Image (tube, rainbow, N blue to C red):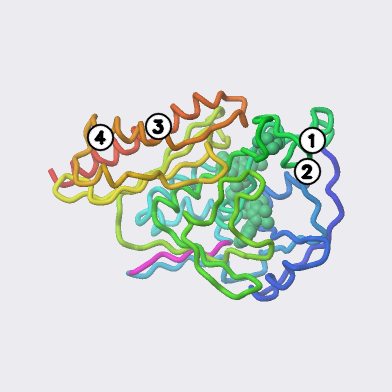
Amino acid sequence: MTAPLPPFRVLRPQAIEAAVAAGAAPGGARYLAGGTDLLVNLRRGLLAPAVLIDLGGIAEFADIRCTDQRTRIGSGVTLARLATDPAVGARHPALRAAAVAVAAPGHRNLATIGGNLCADTRCIYYNQSEWWRRANGICLKSGGEICHVAPEGKRCHAAFSGDLAPALIALDAVAEIAGPGGRRRIACADLYAEDGRAHLQLGGADLITAIELPAEPVRSGYLKERVRQAFDFPLAGVAVALATETGRLSMLRVAITGTNSRPFLVENTAALLGRAVDEELLGQLDKLVQKQVRPMRTTLTPAGYRRIVAAALARRLLASLGASAAASVA
Ligand SMILES: Cc1cc2nc3c(=O)[nH]c(=O)nc-3n(C[C@H](O)[C@H](O)[C@H](O)COP(=O)(O)OP(=O)(O)OC[C@H]3O[C@@H](n4cnc5c(N)ncnc54)[C@H](O)[C@@H]3O)c2cc1C
Ligand code: SF4
């Protein structure tokens, strides 16, 4: 059962400064990009800001610029465009693969890179209509007293399930932010916190204006597993970026989504550098991933399965990227 949208005013600023100023509107404000996450959540009564700030009027948000040093992608670039832009595909295969893997074509035509990075965390006890949540007991994330997933604890374990973040983290991307205090840059890896209620390290009026990626070529890819292959959020999603020298790993970044309240860079992969991608190394990566993911009972799919899936995807992706690197020097 869907409820009507709550009342709100819509502003359509033409400049970044005006958008940030509107972000401090009384009664609460939210940026509206493609709306494919936000409008669903509004309809479910998960939030009720007084003002929506439509970002569609800010022309520079739609730019993609490629130089010898970097790729700069405006935060309003749609996932459909990311999935088909030849330069993005050639330079950053993981980003292209992640964009193609988000939802369905209709969503990707509207959904943006900025909105994907800032999408809310998800849980089967939260992404429900208001009457369902009331009938089953309002949980911490909706302002209640208890977490149904981990009733002993005091934190929300809702999972971040955006597909683009792990690709951008693995590719060492940086987000440009405009906020009330001016402009700043944050590594995409540092945008998030392990808290399902407050997973973004951004203030309410902070606006992602663009993403920058180093242009230096690295091999990269993204794989996700989902219940419905046609379109679905990831049970787990893994991005890998690597470089090799004389058949040995000289750089390796592995990032994961769907299992924790934040997408994160797998730690301690430095121990795998200087080695060839073989079964022993893949087994070590499998262990690192299984140790670091923290899936909880936030989806209908068991947490233990999501842990194994994350490790299997990491293993599979590293094996295939390693094999293509080896083939290119043979
Ligand atoms: C049926 C369905 C299936 C889906 N499947 C997937 C999936 O498989 N993978 C996946 O990743 N997502 C999925 N989604 C979620 C959603 O479609 C995507 O995450 C999408 O990329 C969100 O982008 P958007 O531009 O529509 O964001 P919006 O809905 O407009 O915004 C999302 C959030 O980001 C904030 N925001 C937007 N732009 C900015 C900005 N520039 N700076 C700061 N904050 C900003 C908004 O205020 C809001 O809080 C699915 C959604 C639906 C309805
Ligand atoms: S993890 Fe707990 S607090 Fe968070 S949304 Fe789920 S039930 Fe609610």
In screen coordinates, is 190 left or right of 159? left
- Which of the two discs, 3 and 1, labels the residue nearer the N terminus? 1
For label 4, count other residues whose C-alpha is less than 10 Å away and answer few (under 14), some (14-19) or many (20+). Answer: some
The residue labelled by disc 4 is 281
Q: Quadrant of residue 58?
A: bottom right
C-alpha distance separating marks 2 and 1:
7 Å
Residue 99, given in percent of the width and then of the height, sits at 50, 48
Q: Main secondary structure of the magenta part?
A: strand
**Magenta stretch bounds:** 69-75
- Mark 3 vs ligand 1: CB under 8 Å? no
Q: Earlier in the sequence, mark 4 or mark 1?
A: 1
Q: Can I make out residue 34 in this image? A: no
The answer to whether residue 10 is left or right of residue 184 is right
Q: Earlier in the sequence, mark 2 or mark 1?
A: 1
**Residue at the location (51% across, 55% down)?**
81
Marks 3 and 2 sit apart, C-alpha to C-alpha, by 34 Å
Relative depth, front residue between 41 and 139:
139
The tag on residue 300 is none
Q: Amino acid at mark 4?
A: Leu
What type is the residue that disc 2 sits on? Gly
Dots 2, 1 in contact, CB < 8 A? yes
The residue pinned by badge 2 equals 143
Give the residue number, with chain letter if any, for mark 1. 138
